Image (cartoon, coloured by chain):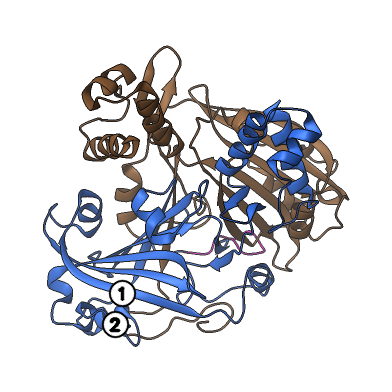
Chain colours: A brown, B blue
Amino acid sequence: MYRKIAADLRDKIKSGELPPGSLLPTQQELSRKYEVARMTTRQAIAELINEGLVVAQQGRGVTVRDRQQMVYRPQDGWEAPTSPTIDRFTAAFTRHGRNPSMEIDVSVVQADDFVAERLGVEPRSQVVARRRVISLDGTPFHINDTYYPYELVRDTEIMSPADIPGGSNYVLAERGYRERYAIDEFFIRMPTPEEIGRLRLNPGTPVAMHVVTGFTAREEPVRCDIFILPGDRHVIMYERVHPIDDEGRPVSTPRGGQS
Amino acid sequence: MYRKIAADLRDKIKSGELPPGSLLPTQQELSRKYEVARMTTRQAIAELINEGLVVAQQGRGVTVRDRQQMVYRPQDGWEAPTSPTIDRFTAAFTRHGRNPSMEIDVSVVQADDFVAERLGVEPRSQVVARRRVISLDGTPFHINDTYYPYELVRDTEIMSPADIPGGSNYVLAERGYRERYAIDEFFIRMPTPEEIGRLRLNPGTPVAMHVVTGFTAREEPVRCDIFILPGDRHVIMYERVHPIDDEGRPVSTPRGGQS
């Protein structure tokens, strides 16, 4: 029976009858309507909370999750958009008048296996960690922790816990380590308790862990960025251009032809 | 107290003391060790199940989740890899000797708002849906549902529920609708009950919904692909090349300069 109640509520959320931010009927109202015990309605609502469809808010009851999603475009600032269509896609998720802020914390830490592998250094060797939480209008939005090989960044601005004008790529380029390409990895999982705390996540909120490893033209790793992107706050977007022209001829690529 | 038990088990999983596939101590063993009621150990384990760290397997007890992740590269077959490094990254997640299979179902359906917006057609107008579940070694791996504007694909092979030699892009190109670029969107969320059923997902398994909209050079949408990628089975990977050369000169892009 609790499955039927959950399914009915799910349908109403999907159809828009219960729009984002609206209050769900109370457990008392549901118990009366379906003629079941409060325990049963509680179970139905717990299921929807685990699915991330609704959020229990202290003193307000249970509301339909309001997905304030923003565009997250790894290519931004790197590759120019190819088509006007991308603007139409991003427009739907672009919020105006939001006030970004961040906390930065810089420290020298021992690389764990994951970061060491990507930076091409020995596990537990020293790396510089710049840890940031980016907030919008005071709400934590995502985590961005960047790791650098220690020798590359010591005695640079990257060591200071302040915003870097021009970005850290500029600092690395000045030292002869210009970033020429990057590999993006995305892992989809539930957040760790630490991430739940740093980002104040509601139950049923999965995250994308976006790992960017940046390389010079000589294939030297220069940074490893780990972003934690809560699913209810981000839409990840890319644009790709097919290397085949309108006559069906392949366009050559740096490595020579198509794979 | 259940939080302490969960934290201890989480640490053991993270450190590898409890490796993927291994059995967790039984509730009885945990109750004895921590001197708590079975209810408390049950709560600790329920927390780890919701986080997706462990899986309750009928008749086997609770085991550490074995993430058999595969590389999912949207650029594959489109853009050739630029650097040998990408091969090193993908190698870790490439499984050999796996046997792929798929179920295909083709039907003419009414476009919902989401698909209609992407295909540039009226909501509830007719579109062709090719629905596939891709399995590896008999286990469902991901969902791939593709939607086409009806007029573009009627009387083509795309209407038949069989594999298309050369792919559907080839069929569209033959009809004068060669795909030239695509926009990727990723939404991170918990699966719907329908997706849990089609993919036989364990609790605590979030998914990435990957939406690909393909366009001709004339900006006409030709297809909308919706992939449902369970987080425990996929690593999504991209490679990007910076349009700045080693002397710091910007490389021109189709739309003219950097954004």
Marked residue chain, label 2? B
Disc 1/disc 2 C-alpha distance (Å): 7 Å
Q: What amino acid type is highlighted by mark number 2? A: Ala
Magenta range is: B244-252
Asked if A60 appears above or below B177 in the picture, the reply is: above
Residue at the (53%, 64%) spot, across then down? B251
Please tell me in which quadrant of the rendered image residue A192 appears.
top right
Closer to us: A33 or A54: A33
Residue B251 is covered by the magenta coloring: yes
N-terminal of the pair, mark 1 or mark 2, is: 1
Circle 1: element type: strand
Residue type, numbered disc 1: Ile
Q: Is residue B65 magenta?
A: no
Q: Specify the quadrant that holds the N terminus of chain A.
A: top left
Q: Quadrant of residue A245?
A: bottom left
Q: Is residue A96 something one can see in this rendering?
A: no
Task: State the residue at coordinates (36%, 46%).
Answer: A90
Q: Is residue A173 left or right of residue A185?
A: right
Frontmost residue, A191 versus A41: A41
Q: State the image coordinates of residue A235 (x, y, percent, origin top left).
A: 42, 46
Question: Which dot marks residue B162?
Answer: 2
Vertical relation: B173 (above or below) A172: below
Residue at numbered disc 1: B104
**Horizontal and vertical percent for residue B24?**
71, 48
